[in-house]
Amino acid sequence: QGRLVESGGGLVQAGGSLTLSCVASDRTFSSHPMGWFRQAPGKEREFVAGISMGGGSTVYADAVKGRFTISRDNAKNTLYLQMNSLKTEDTAVYYCAARRGLGYYISRSPSEYNSWGQGTQVPVSS
């Protein structure tokens, strides 16, 4: 099973922007729906955004709709999350995840993803 490695996190001021990347080590990247999740201190992991295998379909959590954009470059085995107009409540550890062999739809449930990166921290200061 391939690895997922996130990068791009770091301290950002409220109102600022940040782009997260997630590189997959395996050649089956284009065969899996992918998702971004986040987990704030003391809270459960929550869905942020998901994207279909080819990138033609995307789904967003209401909290980030209109501010975040998920995309993928299958030629580079890379998933992205462009985050604009960041708010302090966006502070969390962000994880990318893959649904390997579990179907073709985009799920909002963390339990329906079976491959996870190690996470990257995004603190948003006021």
Image (spheres, helix red, strand yellow):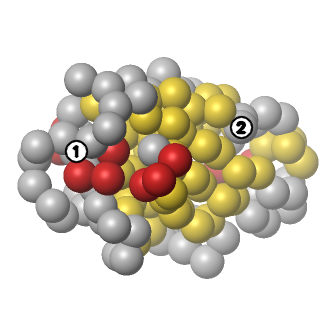
Amino acid residing under circle 2: Gly
Q: Bin the neighbour count of mark 1 within 10 Å (Cα to Cα): few under 14, some 14-19, many 20 and up.
A: many
Looking at the rendered structure, the secondary structure element under dot 1 is loop
Q: Is residue 43 visible?
A: no
Q: Are marks 2 and 1 in contact (CB under 8 Å)?
A: no
Q: Position of residue 16 (x, y in %)?
A: 86, 57
Residue on which disc 1 sits: 99
- Residue 57 in the figure: left or right of residue 109: right
- Residue 9 in the figure: left or right of residue 57: right
* Viewer-proximal residue among 126 and 20: 20
- Residue 96 quadrant: top left
- In this view, 95 is above or below 46: above
Q: Position of residue 10 (x, y in %)?
A: 78, 33
Q: Position of residue 46 (x, y in %)?
A: 40, 46
Looking at the rendered structure, the secondary structure element under dot 2 is loop
What residue is drawn where x is 27% and y is 42%?
28
- In this view, 26 is above or below 51: above
Amino acid residing under circle 1: Arg
Label for residue 26? none
- Residue 46 in the figure: left or right of residue 70: left
- In this view, 124 is above or below 26: below
Pointer 2 or 1: first along the chain? 2
Q: Position of residue 72 (x, y in %)?
A: 49, 58
Q: Bin the neighbour count of mark 2 within 10 Å (Cα to Cα): few under 14, some 14-19, many 20 and up.
A: some
How far separated are the C-alphas under marks 2 and 1? 22 Å
What residue is drawn where x is 50% and y is 57%?
73
What residue is drawn where x is 43% and y is 35%?
24
* Viewer-proximal residue among 22 and 106: 22
What residue is drawn where x is 76% and y is 51%?
18
Q: Is residue 72 visible?
A: yes
Residue on which disc 2 sits: 8
